Amino acid sequence: MTHTDADAVGGRLVRDIRLDFPAFASSGHDRPTAYLDSAATSQRPTAVLDAERDYLEHHLAAVHRGASAATGESTTLFEDGRADVARFVGVGDREIVWAQNATDALNMVALGIADASAGIGGRDAARFALQPGDEIVLTEAEHHANLLPWQRVAQRTGARIVPVRVDEHGVWSIDDLAAVLTERTRIVAFAEVSNVTGMIAPVAEIAEIAHRHGSFVVLDACQSVPHRPVDFAAYGVDFAAFSAHKMLGPNGIGVLYGREELLDALPPARTGGSTITKVTLEEAHFLPAPHRFEAGTQAVSQAIGLAAAVRYLEGIGMDAVAAHEEAFAARVVDGVAALPGVRIVGPQPGERRAGLVSVSVDGVHAHDVGQFLDEAGIVVRVGHHCAQPLHRALGITATTRASAHVYTTADEADRFVSTLGEVRGFFGLAREAS
Ligand code: PMP
């Protein structure tokens, strides 16, 4: 393996970073598997696995319940984890709500808004109420997690989904979005980084114009928080969602961010134990955020593992992580651009994109491409990536995506490109590509 600039992240060599990840321990083969599917789920460093194990072995007790010293210690670890996550995204501790994953977090916002529209949550929640004919602006590139919950809101309230259309490469601009905003726009929801195109949206600028129209701004930060520096407070968004398992953390936990005054007014989508101040047989009064949203027993060891992931990423530095992954994407895009019959989805060569690249190979289904790559020891994601409207707009049913994280090497980018270059030849489509 040759080492180039692309093989260092900040001050550390990728080769050394890989030693932090048990998944990359020597497999005994000359050529280890190239794991290029971090946008789906990332590998976890020992620091995360150890943090969870240490909690489970030495500190496990209920949180926010009872008066024992053990409970107090467990609660402190749990809440310290929340503080780590809050710092990582530039917000206050009370603005971080634990969810199961990003999908769950986005549903919490949408269902809260649907409830508010039905009169639940009283006067405080009335600011969220949608009327028939109100407009929810979404881009055509959204992941289903940031589309289906809004369809449900539209069904319940009579609001309308207004799409921001993508161009022939699957990207959209702030002007495209601004053009569909009206005085009826109540919600603008979009991903900071598309999980298919790798396009990076100008979040702060969009939040500003959406707010000028009196709209709430909901950010799907699932592909940005794990890979680049973000600051939700500086962005000025109202809500944001992300998942731990894409940022070197555990499964089973995600985050909903909301501005404090909004979270305190949004009806909790799920109700039950640990969310209340007073309960009678007829009604309940809810705690302020974040606890009003955290019904039932929480994913405590996962929260502690996520906090360890955050500290690990902070140790490397998110600017360095973003630069490393953008270099990966540029290397892949430049290589793929030279391959006949392979179409690059999203920003084109020379244009800025996050660390993932989706391609479509003329005449070969993405599943066949994926299998060919798999046989060469390269793990990618194939399919519609939970973004059917985007693929429909592009006139294709599926793409093949390679994505990076801190542990991805330049050699892996090159292996992806060279193996992709053999696909059409293998399927008898182009001799020059074999
Ligand atoms: N949004 C985007 C942009 C994503 O990439 C994903 C995961 N593929 C999600 C939302 C949903 O994340 P999760 O499945 O962890 O809830």
Image: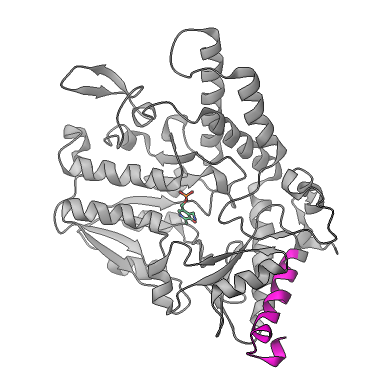
| On-image quarter of the C terminus | bottom right
- Count of numbered circles in the view: 0
Is residue 73 visible to us here?
yes
Q: Is residue 360 magenta?
A: no
Residue 43 picture location, percent across and down: 65, 48
Residue 260, compared with residue 63, is above or below; it is below
Q: Is residue 424 magenta?
A: yes
Q: Which residues are magenta?
A: 412-434
The answer to whether 419 appears left or right of 266 in the picture is right
Residue 103 picture location, percent across and down: 41, 48
The answer to whether 132 appears left or right of 10 in the picture is left
> Which of the 4 quarters of the picture holds residue 165?
bottom left
Residue 15, compared with residue 353, is above or below; it is above
Residue at point 70%, 92% (across, down): 431
Residue at point 57%, 36% (across, down): 306
Q: 401 or 91: nearer the eye?
A: 401
Residue 215 picture location, percent across and down: 28, 52
